[in-house]
């Protein structure tokens, strides 16, 4: 038996996973243990969990693989600084000491951190480094239900690449072409996230959620920032951006183009302007993704598409690619962001480096993405007693009856079963349930339960056999990564008063 530990850390979403003979045994993100969203620190708790779940000690692990190459990233920082000097001095000077002390010597740093799990772990010879976008591509292709696929990855930036096209066939996966920093679809979307007053690297969901409330009236202005070729490749006009050299995403030229300064979330409300901005950047993002998909479909003549990288979490854009019927089948890695890089790095090592045979699982190899922690009935009851919670235990039938009754009375339900999901979406393992027929539900769940903006969306859950009665989509969508339209006969238009309620 060969075991591989995959690690993603020190950037966005730290995570760890373990493969045993190429099969995913466990995977989890550090934030779930530390309760710090997008925790980028060394994933001590996630590694402890995957080791325990796999009944392995660290010194029993055959290979350990990190999701990117720190030296190439250092080179990008250095060259970007030289190319833009002296403009970037502030951010460069700020980033430099950390890079020199920690990131450049990452093998050493990793080794020392890893030792804290097991004092018998005493050689760094089994530590390997994958490539950021190869890790993304591998996380999308190898668990997919396809024997052959084109793989598109897009995010903010890895080492140099921001967008890649790869082709996967059996156990091989090869990156065919790349778009390099500073030209980045992820960073363009993040620039608008920042401009709309949301946090970069986490507020992108908010911008996407805001888009349907706006009209894309700034589409032409967005196009001034980016030169989009017919094949979907693009170049950003750097004079509008600050991210290569500064500590903010956009600059005064950007503000002048759109006519306002970035929204200050502390004292400025979201207005129709921000909704229209969100709709405009969303529309351009969709256009780029569709053009890229069309071009690679034609070039490689392969009927399956896999997606990963942070941009692949834009489920609205994914839904549009599906709607356009460019590919026969689409599969998206549920942990499409950097957390999934831990999984991709491990899979890349197993298949590409070690040449192991790949057997395609027609249902995909992610086990529903239920790869995290699980607890027995005794453990749960013990924990509840410990905190003095009032509870009763129900048999399956009364549990279902009671839940349905509560739901139809407009109550919110915390639903906890089986293993925790890997990836940002709650898929029925750790979910909050509500009745979509209620016109108060969206607002109440957002404001009273999740303490977040009232416009944030929720995903519907529907029996597979009833899917086409409700939505204009007819493919499995188990990972909340494809947005479809609701059928017109089921749609209830919001009145103007109801729209106001959403915003108050
Ligand atoms: Fe990434």
Image: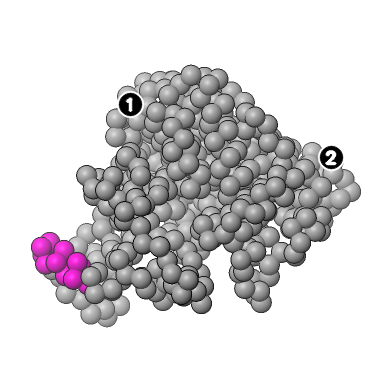
User: In the drawing, does residue 347 fall left or right of residue 299?
Assistant: left
> Which x, y percent locates residue 163?
61, 35
Question: Image quadrant for the N terminus?
Answer: top left
Q: Which residue is mark 2?
A: 83
Which stretch is magenta? 395-406
Q: Describe the element under mark 1 as helix, strand or loop.
A: loop
Beta carbon at label 2 within 8 Å of ligand 1: no
- Neighbourhood count class around disc 2 (C-alpha, 10 Å): few under 14, some 14–19, many 20 upward: few
Asked if residue 6 shows in the view, the reply is no
In this view, the residue in front, 388 or 236, is: 236
Quadrant for residue 262, please give it. bottom right
> Which x, y percent locates residue 432?
33, 64
Above or below, 217 relative to 343: below
In this view, the residue in front, 52 or 501, is: 501
Q: Residue at x 53, y 31 (%)?
A: 293
> Which x, y percent locates residue 119?
46, 48
Q: Residue at x 16, y 74 (%)?
A: 392
- Neighbourhood count class around disc 1 (C-alpha, 10 Å): few under 14, some 14–19, many 20 upward: some
User: In the drawing, does residue 493 fall left or right of residue 90?
Assistant: left
Q: Is residue 401 magenta?
A: yes
Main SS class of the magenta portion in the image = helix
Beta carbon at label 1 within 8 Å of ligand 1: no
Q: For the residues marked 1 and 2, what is the alpha-carbon distance in whole angstroms?
A: 45 Å
In this view, the residue in front, 446 or 73, is: 446
Q: Which residue is mark 1?
A: 360
Identify the mark nearer the N-term, 1 or 2: 2
User: In the drawing, does residue 440 fall left or right of residue 380?
Assistant: right
Q: Residue at x 19, y 66 (%)?
A: 404
């Amino acid at each position: 038996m060969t075991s591989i530990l995959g690690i993603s850390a020190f950037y966005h979403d730290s995570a760890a996973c373990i493969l045993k003979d190429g099969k995913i045994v466990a995977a989890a993100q550090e934030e779930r243990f530390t309760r710090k969203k997008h925790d980028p620190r060394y994933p001590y708790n996630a590694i402890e969990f995957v080791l325990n779940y796999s009944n392995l000690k660290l010194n029993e692990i055959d290979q350990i693989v990190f999701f990117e190459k720190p030296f190439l990233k250092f080179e990008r920082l250095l060259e970007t600084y030289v190319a833009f000097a002296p403009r970037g001095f502030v951010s460069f000077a700020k980033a430099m000491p950390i890079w020199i002390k920690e990131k450049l010597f990452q093998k050493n740093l990793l080794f020392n951190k890893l030792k804290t799990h097991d004092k018998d772990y005493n050689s760094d010879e089994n530590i390997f480094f994958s490539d950021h976008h190869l890790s993304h591509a591998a996380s999308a292709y190898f668990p997919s239900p396809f024997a052959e696929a084109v793989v598109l990855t897009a995010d903010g930036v890895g080492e140099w690449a921001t967008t890649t096209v790869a082709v996967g066939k059996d156990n091989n996966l090869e990156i065919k072409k790349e778009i390099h920093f500073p030209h980045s679809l992820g960073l363009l979307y993040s620039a608008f996230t920042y401009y709309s007053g949301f946090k970069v690297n986490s507020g992108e969901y908010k911008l996407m959620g805001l888009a349907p409330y706006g009209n894309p009236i700034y589409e032409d202005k967005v196009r001034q920032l980016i030169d989009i070729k017919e094949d979907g490749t693009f170049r950003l006009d750097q004079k509008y951006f600050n991210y290569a050299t500064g500590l903010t995403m956009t600059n005064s030229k950007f503000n002048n183009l759109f006519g306002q300064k970035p929204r200050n979330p502390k004292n400025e409300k979201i207005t129709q302007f921000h909704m229209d901005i969100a709709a405009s950047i969303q529309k351009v993002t969709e256009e780029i993704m569709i053009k890229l998909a069309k071009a690679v479909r034609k070039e490689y003549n392969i009927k399956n598409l896999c997606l990963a990288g942070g941009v692949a979490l834009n489920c609205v854009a994914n839904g549009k690619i599906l709607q356009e019927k460019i590919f026969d089948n689409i599969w998206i890695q549920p942990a499409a962001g950097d957390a999934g890089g831990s999984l991709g790095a491990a899979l890349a090592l197993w298949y590409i480096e070690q040449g192991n045979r790949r057997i395609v699982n027609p249902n995909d190899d992610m086990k529903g993405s239920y790869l995290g922690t699980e607890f027995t009935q005794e453990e749960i009851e013990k924990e509840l007693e410990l905190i003095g919670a009032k509870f009763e235990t129900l048999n399956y039938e009364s549990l279902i009856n009671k839940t349905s009754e509560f739901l139809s009375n407009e109550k919110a339900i915390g639903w906890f079963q089986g293993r925790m999901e890997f990836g940002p979406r709650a898929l029925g393992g750790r979910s909050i349930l509500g009745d979509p027929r209620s016109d108060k539900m969206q607002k109440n769940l957002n404001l009273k339960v999740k303490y977040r903006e009232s416009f944030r969306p929720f995903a519907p859950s529907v029996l597979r056999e009833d899917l086409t009665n409700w939505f204009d989509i007819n493919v499995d969508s188990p990972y909340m990564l494809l947005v479809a339209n609701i059928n017109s006969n089921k749609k209830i238009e919001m009145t103007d008063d109801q729209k106001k309620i959403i915003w108050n």
